[in-house]
Amino acid sequence: MMDRYSRLQTLVIYAALAVFLTFILLPFVEMFMVSLRPLEHLFSTPYRFWGDDFSFAVYRQIWETVPLLGRYIFNSIYISGMVTAITMIFVVPAAYAYARLDFPFKNASLAIFLGVNMFTGAVLLIPLYRVLRTLGLLNTYWAMIVPGVAFLIPTGIWLLRSYLEKIPRELEEAAFVDGASRLYTLRRVVLPLAVPGLIVVSVAFFIGAYAQQFLFAITFNQVREYQPLPAGLFEFIGYQDVTWNEMMAASLTGVLPVMVVFLFLQKYFVAGLTAGAVKE
Amino acid sequence: MTGLAEDTTAQARRRVPVRLPEGWFAWALIGPAMIFIGVIVAWPLVETFRLSFTDANLGGESWVGWENYADLWGSTKFSQTIARTFFWMALSVSLKLVMGLIGATLLNATVPGRALFRVLVMPPWVIPVAIGMIGWLWLYNGHFGMLSGMVQKIGLLDGPFEFLAYKNSAFYSAIVADVWVGTPMVTLFFLAAMQGVPKDLYEAAYVDGASRWYRFRRITIPQIMPVIVSMALLSAIWTFNSFEIIWILTEGGPRGATTTLIVDTYKVAIGNYKFGEGAACAVVIVILLALFSLVYLFFLNKVNRRYGNK
């Protein structure tokens, strides 16, 4: 049939996949290899891909050389979790309004939200710094959570709106006829039905927030105890003698939580992000 | 039978008065998000415009009118930076789209193990960009990194090569890293779009004896065109704004070779504490992005009309 390949074609597909995946996974392979190598052998020429003295020792050492590693990982998870929760609180009602209601300035206000997607925090750092200072949020977790939420809200409205649009209107109207208020309908009829969509979008938010903590952290937070993983580790690169094998081990250990979350929920993650862009 | 018909018309009649005045309720739902964005994004944006007419720095600020803009206008370095940014964006986005198309086509092929391959594509997208760049930093290391080592092994180079130490190689190395970060998302969006293409189109073409390449060109590409175009816009905006990748790899160097507008803005404002000048650069970015998006949306409309999408 149409979907069958000859042996040669299958071979070509696998070869091409191998090249593609090598490009994607190369940095991880390199990081892992470096982490296994004792430091004195790391800086040896000529280059050798394979070594005979690989060991996992650094994975124990890092907890001593980077005493705050556990804290950094916790901070990353905490910040991402808070960003996700707060963004949901803002986004769910707004997405519902755009999915269901007709109101003045609907398109104009939606355009404003989506316009925010055009910027990154990097353009607004100075005034944003002043705003956060005025609100007294600098050097707290909030200094990283608040901007994170702001830049996720537009995407969130966009994604969740397409989920809520799929919930049958008739159910809401039935609730109405029975005399339920607007808010009661949203809370008791729409939200329970939207739970799968809400989970999908939250997973996407969490992973997105975990990946995007660097800039706000190095600009708005000086307190080492509050630093998320990327900013915490980056501090070590500035040092004179970077112990690269430990750097790599710490980096790989640090992304482990998000990789686990991702592996378990990857189906929802991809579905969540592609839902808005791909027509049904 | 007549009873049923009456029921549906009755239902239809009943549906009309259900609609309440919705305006106040809708704005009550949107208000919190709007206010939040207002304080954290819109107000700083207005502030940026105001600051761009001052010489704000750590010591204070005073009004200087158009001076910052005049300086930028007269600076060849700045116009070079703009040109470099657009080159960076164009090259990186086209590579991401090509890689995405190739990747999605491969992952869409019905071969054993494709579920696993689809998962293996995603890590660069999922992990923090900064962490991925730590890996690339080492890969690009001339003495101990894998790339230089392998190239020497093959015999293309006699000695170590520091990828990030020379103007050209640093620029293209940064592009490769940027493409690496952006490719997984583009791939998965294209894959999702490809899976949404109706199967019968392919079957009809297959029955008519169309080759794989023909089917790809005349069915797949037109069918997923709207997604290609919107991914191109999204990646263009993100690539334009991409900061962490360049900052971690090269900090904009060597000798400015990888300084894009966003890196320049950061260096001026945060590195040199010239808030006013930095704000003027930021305003230029905002205006360029707005213009770019407008042109693009016009183009997107045309594409969508042509390929029959709403």
Image (spheres, coloured by chain):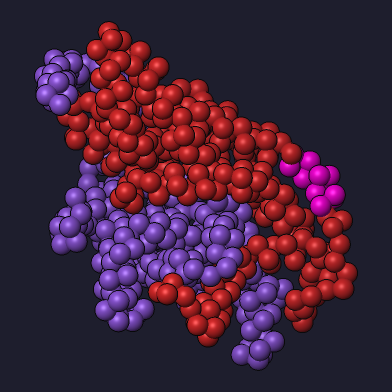
Chain colours: A red, B purple
Magenta stretch: dominant secondary structure: helix
A39 versus A264 height, above or below: below
- Quarter residue A79 falls in: top right
Q: Position of residue B59 (x, y in %)?
A: 43, 36
Please tell me whether residue A66 belongs to the stretch shown in magenta. Answer: yes
Q: Is residue A222 toward the left or the right of residue B46 in the image?
A: right
- Measuring 26% from the left and 79% from the top, which residue is drawn there? B208
Nearest the camera: A95 or A215?
A: A95
Is residue A279 among what the camera can see? yes
- Quarter residue A139 falls in: top right
Q: Tag count in the figure? A: 0
Please tell me whether residue B141 belongs to the stretch shown in magenta. Answer: no
- Measuring 58% from the left and 74% from the top, which residue is drawn there? A18
Nearest the camera: A93 or A216?
A: A93
Residue that extends furthest to the top in the rendered view of this protein: A179
Q: Position of residue B18 (x, y in %)?
A: 18, 16
Q: Position of residue B251 (x, y in %)?
A: 52, 59
- Measuring 33% from the left and 51% from the top, which residue is drawn there? A278
Q: Position of residue B205 (x, y in %)?
A: 28, 74
Is residue B264 among what the camera can see? no
Residue numbers of the magenta segment = A59-69
A268 versus B208 height, above or below: above
Nearest the camera: A166 or B84?
A: A166
- Measuring 81% from the left and 52% from the top, which residue is drawn there? A59
A187 versus A61 height, above or below: above
